[in-house]
Amino acid sequence: METRKTCSSMAALFLFIAALMASSSIAAIPTSSFEDNFNIMWSENHFTTSEDGQIWNLALDNDTGCGFQTKHMYRFGWFSMKLKLVGGDSAGVVTAYYMCSENGAGPERDEIDFEFLGNRTGQPYVIQTNVYKNGTGNREMRHSLWFDPTKDYHSYSILWNNHQLVFFVDQVPIRVYKNSDKVPNNDFFPNQKPMYLFSSIWNADEWATRGGLEKTDWKKAPFVSSYKDFAVEGCRWKDPFPACVSTTTENWWDQYDAWHLTKTQKMDYAWVQRNLVVYDYCKDNERFPTLPWECSISPWA
């Protein structure tokens, strides 16, 4: 019975995805080449591209990983990239795709995270998302996926405005993180600091797979994640204060329809909540006897 129910839900989800991708206004156009958008952060010799420069590869071995970041900072917008994750035995390996207000993990940073946690061959990938405000995170959610992210490219996107943060996988909202004007001193929603977009691959076998029980098998190295089709529509930061910050509502990503999920997105989101959530900090009463304030905000509003 449960198998038939899950298969039926899966089929319905695919129909929702197809309809959304056919009609959605949120499919930003990929923006030019890697060199136009990014700088390599470290280990340039672990970075390669396809012959046409449209596919970018980051490699991890026992010496080091690799990473890149955008040349520009943004405050609010739509950010999307297609990734193909490390295949095979990837236990201990983390591919990170995230936004951050600083180049390093500073104590006052704001951050919006996708982290893809590797696993033993044949076991599913888990996506961990997290949100930091002024250096405080601990807002993890983990999801499984409805496909194998190592076989082909899939899009991973962030919608960010002053009303909500939405994490998308192939145009399907998997996490909705709302702001609220009912809190005088907002300590949970990152809405003041511009951010770079980063991606990196690194070893995290002390915690990434089964809480650190599964270690990285370096005989399988190098571990390679691949990227293409970066797209951004956002307010590009320019010190001291760019004009676009006061005119973001002229853009689709900060208009009323982007402040809430659409009817179709709510259906997709409900399916994800029923079938794919592995961990939600807002339901972890052992870790948080008093749940954080933001857990009381409805994602459906």
Image (cartoon, rainbow, N blue to C red):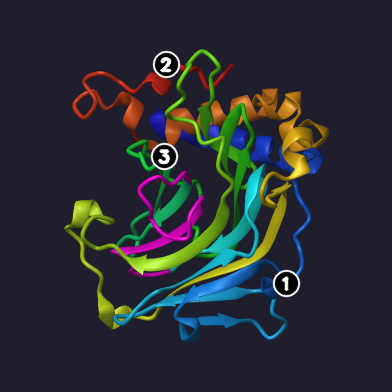
Q: CA distance from mark 1 to mark 3?
A: 32 Å
Please provide percent x and percent y for residue 12.
Answer: 61, 33
Is 96 inside the magenta-drawn segment? yes
Quadrant holding the C terminus: top right
* Rendering quarter of residue 227: bottom right
Is 255 inside the magenta-drawn segment? no
For mark 1, give the secondary structure.
Answer: loop
Disc 1 residue crowd, few under 14, some 14–19, many 20+, Cα 10 Å: some
Q: Disc 2 designates what residue?
A: 296
For mark 3, give the secondary structure.
Answer: loop
Residue 33 disc label = 1
For the magenta stretch, what is the residue range? 87-111
Residue 169 disc label = none
Q: Amino acid at mark 1?
A: Ser
Which of these two is toward me, 144 or 202? 202
Is any part of residue 256 visible from this angle? yes
* Nearer mark to the viewer, of 1 and 3: 3
Residue 26 versus residue 188 in the image, above or below: below
Counting the numbered discs, the total is 3
N-term-proximal mark, 1 vs 2: 1
N-term-proximal mark, 3 vs 2: 3
Please provide percent x and percent y for residue 121.
Answer: 33, 65
Residue 203 versus residue 8 in the image, above or below: below
Callout 3 touching callout 2 (CB < 8 Å): no
Say whether residue 209 is left or right of residue 3.
left
Residue 134 disc label = 3
Q: CA distance from mark 1 to mark 2?
A: 42 Å
Quadrant holding the N terminus: top left
Please provide percent x and percent y for residue 135.
Answer: 37, 43
